[in-house]
Image (tube, grey):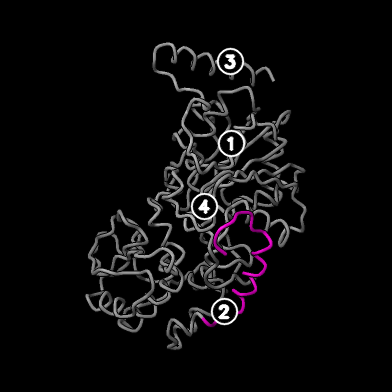
Amino acid sequence: MGHFFSRRVLLSSAAVAMAGTGMGIPPLEDRPRHRNLETGVQVLMADDYELVQGQKVGIVTNPTGILPDRRHEVDVMAATDKIDLVAVFGPEHGFRGTAQAGGSEGFYLDEQTGLPVYDTYLTSGQALADIFTRSGVDSIMFDIQDAGARFYTYIWTMFDSMQAAALAGKRFVVLDRPNPITGRRAYGPVMTPQFSTFIGREAISQAHGLTVGELARLFNAEFLGGRVDLTVVEMRGWKRDQAYEDTGLPWVLPSPNMPTVDTALVYSGTGMFEGTNLSEGRGTTRPFELIGAPYVDHRWANALNELGLPGAGFRLAYFTPTFSKHVNKLCGGVQLYVTDQKAFDPVKTGIAMIVTAKRLYPDDFAWRYDTSDPARPYWIDKMTGSTQVRTDIDGGKGPDEVESGWADALKEFATTRQKYLIYRGGN
């Protein structure tokens, strides 16, 4: 306890000293807040952290755990005695976001706050429970901005953390944030058990249409047997059909290749190109919006525009990735534009793009093969959750026929999903 109070006093004294010189950071209550929306962490702070009073607290977060004034919640919490924050748990890319895809930061003491940061990436079950126990926390909070797609790994970091919290006998608190692609509805194929991986642990649809708080409720009830001592700190003022740009919240890159809200809008569809030999735009300034390969020409853009896909438009584009697939090679392809968010179906659009590319370039198009997993060698199967999408496309089916292959499973998930909705607006 002595370390806790001495660090708080030191940080608080420094803040006061800086304020006296005109260089300090005003207290949270003196900062303007968006009138219509408060995220979970804002609600927690507005209630003077009453929810976790008398508890040692750890938090799973990354650079997206910010307040509307762009201060990071960990920096704010570390400087107050109203909460006993004793640990941070870093996911993929790390707490401060220093690592690229597939990387993390390891254990370290955070330079700004002095807090220990534990690496949880690719750790689950009892091993993760042991980390939580070793950290000395009573409650574990989660606050990371999601991108709305099943294969975006932060929701599975939350799932693993919930499971580990139950094993360690710890409380789990989700500080809710908006789904950046809205929560109107769910889209796409549903994961099947034999294709469970870290990019899809359980049977949810490819674009789930839920907030992380709603997902946590679903995970606990449907997949974790209700064993988690779960609390969701709900947002105030968010509606399901609200576009992210209307929330008044700043966008922070949740990962290096998710630079804008535009990226998130298309990611649950064009992310499937990671399962092909086309570049998904990594190594460009518009990942997942720019898609192409050295063998692609102008015909793809023309064919896609002729489809008249709702809410989607395409332009012929050329780009040279600086890393990842086709590095330093000129690629022909398209840039995808969302012209109407309400009409846009990201998964159907992604399927149409793959179907059209395979038909135009049958001798060049290929599925990405995973030699390390001979039982499940195709990446696209792991991303879509079964063999259905790949085998339907290989069999010559069109986008509508491919979509019909997951319709029943999606309808069933959509019914289950309804039980865990918190917010109004949309379906």
Task: Say few, some or many: other residues with alpha carbon within 10 Å of mark 4 (under 14 / 14 to 19 / 20 or more).
Answer: many
Q: Earlier in the sequence, mark 1 or mark 3?
A: 3
For image coordinates 29% across by 80% down, the residue present is 306
Q: Earlier in the sequence, mark 4 or mark 2?
A: 4
Which residue occupies the foreground of this view, 262 or 156? Answer: 262
What is the three-letter code of the residue carrying label 2? Answer: Ala
For image coordinates 33% across by 61% down, the residue present is 281
Q: Would residue 331 appear left or right of 347 to someone viewing this image?
A: left
Which element is circle 1 on?
A: strand
Which residue occupies the foreground of this view, 412 or 60? Answer: 412
Which residue occupies the foreground of this view, 370 or 67? Answer: 67
How far separated are the C-alphas under marks 2 and 1? 41 Å
Is residue 323 visible in the rendered image? The answer is: no
Task: Say few, some or many: other residues with alpha carbon within 10 Å of mark 2 (under 14 / 14 to 19 / 20 or more).
Answer: some
Q: Which residue, given by chain and number where applicable, does mark 1 sit on?
A: 88
Residue range in magenta is 404-427
Q: Earlier in the sequence, mark 2 or mark 3?
A: 3
Q: Which residue, given by chain and number where applicable, does mark 3 sit on?
A: 9
Q: At which x and y percent is residue 241?
A: 50, 58
Q: Which residue, given by chain and number where applicable, does mark 4 sit on?
A: 146
How far separated are the C-alphas under marks 4 and 3? 34 Å
Q: Which residue, given by chain and number where applicable, does mark 2 sit on?
A: 407
What is the three-letter code of the residue carrying label 1? Answer: Val
Task: Say few, some or many: other residues with alpha carbon within 10 Å of mark 1 (under 14 / 14 to 19 / 20 or more).
Answer: many
Which element is circle 4 on?
A: loop
Q: Earlier in the sequence, mark 4 or mark 3?
A: 3
Which element is circle 3 on?
A: helix
Residue 399: name its quadrant: bottom left
Question: In the rendered view of the protein, which quadrant contains the C terminus?
Answer: bottom right
